[in-house]
Image (tube, rainbow, N blue to C red):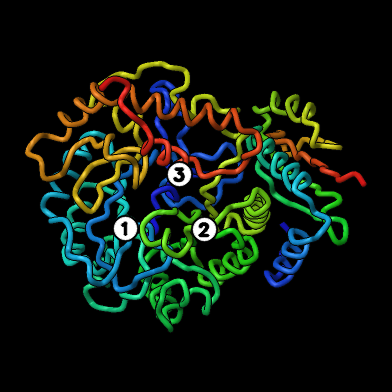
Amino acid sequence: MDTISSSIHSPASVSLPVSPDDDSRFDRTVSPSPAFPKETLQQCRVSRIIQIHPTLRCNLSCKHCYSSSAPEKKEGLAARDLINTLEQAAHLGYNVVSLSGGEPFIYSELEELVTASRTLGYFNSVTTNGMLLRSQRAARILRQLDLVAISVDGKPEAHDHMRNMPGAFARMMEGVAVARDTLDKFGFIHTLLPDSWQILSWLTDLAIEHKASLLHLHPLELSGRATEYFGGLKWSPVDLYRIYIAHYYLKTFAEPDLFIQLDLLHRDNVIDNPNFFFHQNRMPERSAKGFSTLFKELIINEHGDILPIAHGCSPFFRIGNIHSEEPLGTMIEQFMEDKLGYVMQLYNDTYREILADPGVEIFNWPELAIEKSRLLQPLSQ
Amino acid sequence: MEKRSYAEVEKELVAHLSSANLDKAHLAGISKTIAASYNNGLQIVDWWIYGIPAFERIVIQAQLPTAETAAIQTLLGNENFKAIEILRKGIPKPDFFQVQLTVERTA
């Protein structure tokens, strides 16, 4: 299932740990330009996200799903455990909940969860296939949300094919109408494939026509069911350049009516921003209090495991579990004591690989870090 | 930016990006230009494509806050930009530069 976590940052990429004294540079809700694009969050608010996958149940079995969500999956996490964790995380500075899955609207405790997170002060966002938004229950849930991102895979035939369901596009557009009429802000999220550059202008037109605030472009993640259908997929540098160029061209054309978020980086952006990584080898303060400044996104997966970096990172980096009786702050401090050095090494190694390979200029940084995390061995056994 | 229909935009953009003589090196150069622009605090506010069928000249008009004047020095050293025109904008007090960058493909 897609996620819009990274769309709440601008201009690109999911949150990355930065040096504690450099937080202002990565206040990504503030554009350096005098002409601000339309923001999905209040200006000057630094988003610190809890990305939650409460269930892998879904009404669809999409070909590109990185979590292999499906109708036969079992119900997931108990809302009370999630709410307990969110309450503690709020005290540590986290302020955005991003719900994915699975299909969040099929999660039986969604209403309880978003009502509680709203009460705790969170900005509530949900990524959905848009096909289950017409019920009264959905209407109550939508009133608790600040942003909904609806997945769109392309023109109707292509969308239905990817979703493995005829008529999926038409039903999704019914959900778009509901979201547009109910919420101040909604957006579209598209899983990029190598030939997506050919439809980016069509997607932009779709978003503007339906008064979306956001178009989020996220590269296909090769895990879960996606490996079955797209395992042989290769991204050529030319495909990536085309997507990168087309995105910026359309961004120029569409802003400020529509904010277009691309989860790809140019190598020069990374090299020219050394504080993007911990490569300066400065050990940050190891306390729970400063944790959300370093790790602006935490992931709670379908097992309740709390992870940094991004969905799919190695379980070696697990911070804890929501079912634990241990306070979140204690889990975090233990994580920083035991694992922060490994995280720094992971980011440093990823950064050095980027430097060493000038042939790869456009990439999905979190995907590189996740791949590396799965290969990482402890420094000492 | 000049308003056009998306059908026109799609036709123009796809035609250019799929052109047979738009090679990897040229696409890389354009991408590098974009990255350099954003690295230097510019926001691209308009973008013209000249040349049929492939990119031969891209003129990027961007706004650069006057506080970012050091970035202009960096831009002047960027080999991707064949021409840079800089105008101060803002009435009554100049608060940004209008920067026109030309990226040109040589034959």
- Near mark 3 (Cα within 10 A), the count class, few <14, some 14-19 or many ≥20, is some
| Residue at which label 1 appears | A100
In the picture, residue A105 is in which quadrant? bottom left
Q: CA distance from mark 3 to mark 1?
A: 18 Å
In the picture, residue A358 is in which quadrant? top right
The amino acid type found where label 1 is placed reads Ser
Instruction: Give the chain letter at badge 1.
Output: A
Label at residue B74: none
The label nearer to you, 2 versus 3, is 2
Q: Residue at x 73, y 36 (%)?
A: B97
| Residue at which label 2 appears | A232
Q: Are marks 2 and 1 on the same chain?
A: yes
- Confirm whether residue B73 shows in the render: yes
The amino acid type found where label 3 is placed reads Glu
N-terminal of the pair, mark 3 or mark 1, is: 1
The label nearer to you, 2 versus 1, is 2
Residue furthest to the top in view is A282
N-terminal of the pair, mark 2 or mark 1, is: 1
Q: CA distance from mark 2 to mark 1?
A: 26 Å
User: Relative to residue A309, is residue A356 depicted above or below?
Assistant: above
- Confirm whether residue A118 shows in the render: no
